[in-house]
């Protein structure tokens, strides 16, 4: 039986979403661990004034590729960027490129998607569902194709509590929805979106569920696998621990808490935090590509679904995450924190609202007042409004938990040789959560915020300064409040005199007893 690396040797691989978080890790791992792969064709669109070639060459300069660069400085020769805008007819692939792709591609990894929770339904449908349909049509024209791997999400069926390794019936027939929304004005679609998505929390999980059905429909003609990762976080081991390059999911929450901005969030301490490291997802994806091609390509079969989660195997809870994130940012503080990191999660709505008022809005108001008085533009309230919008969208996922069946993940592991199990490790039983969270937090500092580890002493000094400011502020506030009471209430004055005389009595007793003993 060919090993995974042997299988990919000489193969031409097509990847969508290669410029995204997971796509980049996939490209890197393929180049590093399958060095004899023939070519990687990346469907990339021009963006922000950069051509697709410029984007790809920038991507390859990224630190993520340092290990590949060391092993093979000419690795870029294996990368072939293909201009493509996935929401255009025919994926906007030129005729020559189309011919090249159809004649040589052996395996497809479809990672591209919009992962925004607030994406307008029409756009989420175009990219997550219709582009998937178009890619499958293209795949069906590829005579040498051996596997089509679709990246979905473990939350595609988050309207269920228990989720098996199967494709569930769609909330609506995708084609019917696409046809009926086509003629509707955007404002009408926006108005009816909550009714359409029903018990899904957002357009993202809803359209990912529809995409799975589109994929399933074609599964008799192609060899297909669907990978369903849960909440994808920083890398665990590869190419180095802690790689992360975006604010999505928990990363933005960790950063906001580390900067001392986020102090409270609604989450259930005891709910399982189903984080999964990005390298685990990519290792499983590559193994699933190999398995689909080698074991499942001869007879047409139903698409195999791999729930790629940690909760059922090595559970960790939001309460524990809170503890480890906070202690990690105290040891390795972020630069220029707004306040000392001290965030708490609570499942109580009213309690959360109270803390939002006291520890978000009030300090923001004071800081903006200070900015105004010093002739600067106020900004803190605006930052908090955006933060509240973002965490409001995440709370659905942090306030409850789900149970995923990981049978297919285990089955796949059992088919791997001992060597492949090491090279393409997705055994999350070995994951040490506290260590992982520590590296994750350091990763957000180094790779998302581009902060230098050598600045940690200065960041600690800044935290000490913030602590002194807080003590001074609290003391002044206490004295001020007390003075107001003393001035207005006889009762408060009596209490005050009573406490002061008690202190004097205690002091004189202490002095007298120490003179006697001498
Ligand atoms: C209390 C602390 C202790 C911690 C313990 C508790 C932690 C609980 C964490 C709970 C996390 C639960 C996460 C569950 C997610 C599960 C979902 C399923 C997984 C998936 O399948 S997909 C991946 C998830 N997808 C996302 O996370 C996308 C969510 N994001 C959005 O939908 C939008 O970004 C959002 C939030 C609506 C904001 O939109 P908008 O205001 O338009 O801003 P932009 O996205 O355009 O960003 C502008 C700019 O800001 C940067 N940015 C974004 N988010 C943050 C942030 N949180 N903090 C700081 N900066 C942020 C962004 O990078 C952009 O920068 P540019 O430089 O590019 O302009
Ligand atoms: N991140 C997570 O926590 C999870 C992600 N997933 C799934 O994993 C996959 C990858 O996610 P992730 O890497 O995090 O997402 P990113 O947002 O980082 O990447 C999305 C990719 O899709 C590409 N893309 C978006 N729109 C278009 C378009 N119109 N034409 C061409 N390319 C486009 C982006 O290209 P460009 O750079 O040009 O914008 C980018 O390369 C998705 O399918 C997602 O649903 C599943 C579970 C969790």
Image (spheres, grey):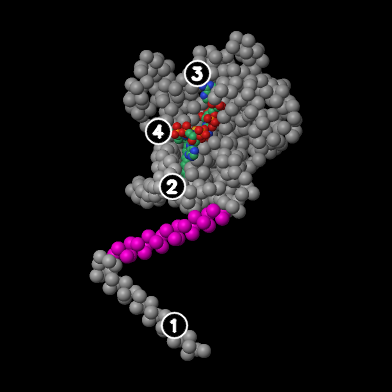
Residue 77: x and y in percent read 72, 23
Real-space Cα separation, disc 4 to disc 1, in angstroms = 64 Å
Q: Earlier in the sequence, mark 3 or mark 4?
A: 3
Residue at 50% across, 31% down: 153
Let me know if residue 239 appears in the view. yes
Residue at 48% across, 49% down: 338
Residue 351: x and y in percent read 35, 50
Q: Nearer the viewer, mark 3 or mark 4?
A: 3
Q: Which mark is residue 395?
A: none
Mark 1: secondary structure: helix
Q: With respect to residue 89, does 514 lie above or below?
A: below
Which residue is tagged 2? 374
Report the span colored magenta.
Answer: 460-485
Q: Residues within 10 Å of mark 3 (few under 14, many from 20)?
A: some
Which residue is tagged 1? 510
In the picture, measured across the screen, residue 19 lies left or right of residue 87, that is right
Q: Nearer the viewer, mark 4 or mark 1?
A: 1
Q: Earlier in the sequence, mark 2 or mark 3?
A: 3
Real-space Cα separation, disc 2 to disc 1, in angstroms = 49 Å
Q: Earlier in the sequence, mark 4 or mark 2?
A: 4
Mark 3: secondary structure: loop
Queried whether the magenta region covers residue 471, the answer comes back as: yes
Which residue is tagged 3? 87
Q: Earlier in the sequence, mark 4 or mark 1?
A: 4
Mark 2: secondary structure: loop
Q: Which mark is residue 201?
A: 4
């Amino acid at each position: 039986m060919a090993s995974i690396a042997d299988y990919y040797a000489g193969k031409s691989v097509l990847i969508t979403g290669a410029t995204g978080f997971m796509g980049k890790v996939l490209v890197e791992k393929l180049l590093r661990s399958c060095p004899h792969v023939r070519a990687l064709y990346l469907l990339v669109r021009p963006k922000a004034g950069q051509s697709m070639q410029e984007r790809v060459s920038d991507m390859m300069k990224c630190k993520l590729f340092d290990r590949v660069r060391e092993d093979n400085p000419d690795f870029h020769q294996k990368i072939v960027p293909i201009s493509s805008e996935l929401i255009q007819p025919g994926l906007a692939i030129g005729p020559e490129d189309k011919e090249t792709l159809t004649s040589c591609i052996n395996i497809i990894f479809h990672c591209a998607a919009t992962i925004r929770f607030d994406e307008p339904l029409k756009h989420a449908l175009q990219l997550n569902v219709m582009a998937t349909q178009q890619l499958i049509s293209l795949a069906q024209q590829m005579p040498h194709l051996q596997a089509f791997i679709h990246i979905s999400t473990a939350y595609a069926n988050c309207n269920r509590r228990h989720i098996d390794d199967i494709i569930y019936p769609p909330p609506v027939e995708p084609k019917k929805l696409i046809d009926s929304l086509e003629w509707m004005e955007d404002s009408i679609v926006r108005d009816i979106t909550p009714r359409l998505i029903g018990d899904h929390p957002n357009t993202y999980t809803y359209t990912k569920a529809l995409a799975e059905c589109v994929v399933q429909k074609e599964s008799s003609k192609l060899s297909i696998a669907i990978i369903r990762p849960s909440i994808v976080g920083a890398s665990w081991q590869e190419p180095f621990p802690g790689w992360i390059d975006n604010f999505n999911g928990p990363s933005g929450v960790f950063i906001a808490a580390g900067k001392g901005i986020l102090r409270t969030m609604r989450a259930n301490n005891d709910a399982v935090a189903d984080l999964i490291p990005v390298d685990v997802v990519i290792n499983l994806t590559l193994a699933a590509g190999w398995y689909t091609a080698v074991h499942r390509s001869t007879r047409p079969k139903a698409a195999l679904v791999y729930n790629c989660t940690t909760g059922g195997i090595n559970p960790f809870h939001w309460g524990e995450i809170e503890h480890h994130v906070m202690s990690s940012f105290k040891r390795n503080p972020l630069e220029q924190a707004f306040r000392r990191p001290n965030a708490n999660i609570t499942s109580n709505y009213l309690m959360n609202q109270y803390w939002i008022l006291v520890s978000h809005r009030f300090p923001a108001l004071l800081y903006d007042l200070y900015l105004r008085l010093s002739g600067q533009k106020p900004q803190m309230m605006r930052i908090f409004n955006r933060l509240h919008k973002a965490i409001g969208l995440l709370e659905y996922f942090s306030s409850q938990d789900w149970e995923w069946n990981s049978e297919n993940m285990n089955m796949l592991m059992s088919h791997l040789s001992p060597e492949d199990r090491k090279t393409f490790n997705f055994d999350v039983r070995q994951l040490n959560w506290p260590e992982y969270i520590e590296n994750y937090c350091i990763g957000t500092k180094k790779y998302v915020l581009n902060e230098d580890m050598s600045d940690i002493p200065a960041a600690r000094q800044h935290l000490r300064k913030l602590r002194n400011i807080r003590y001074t502020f609290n003391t002044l506030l206490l004295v001020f409040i007390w003075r107001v009471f003393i001035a207005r209430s006889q009762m408060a004055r009596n209490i005050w005199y009573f406490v002061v005389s008690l202190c004097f009595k205690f002091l004189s007793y202490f002095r007298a007893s120490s003179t006697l003993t001498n």
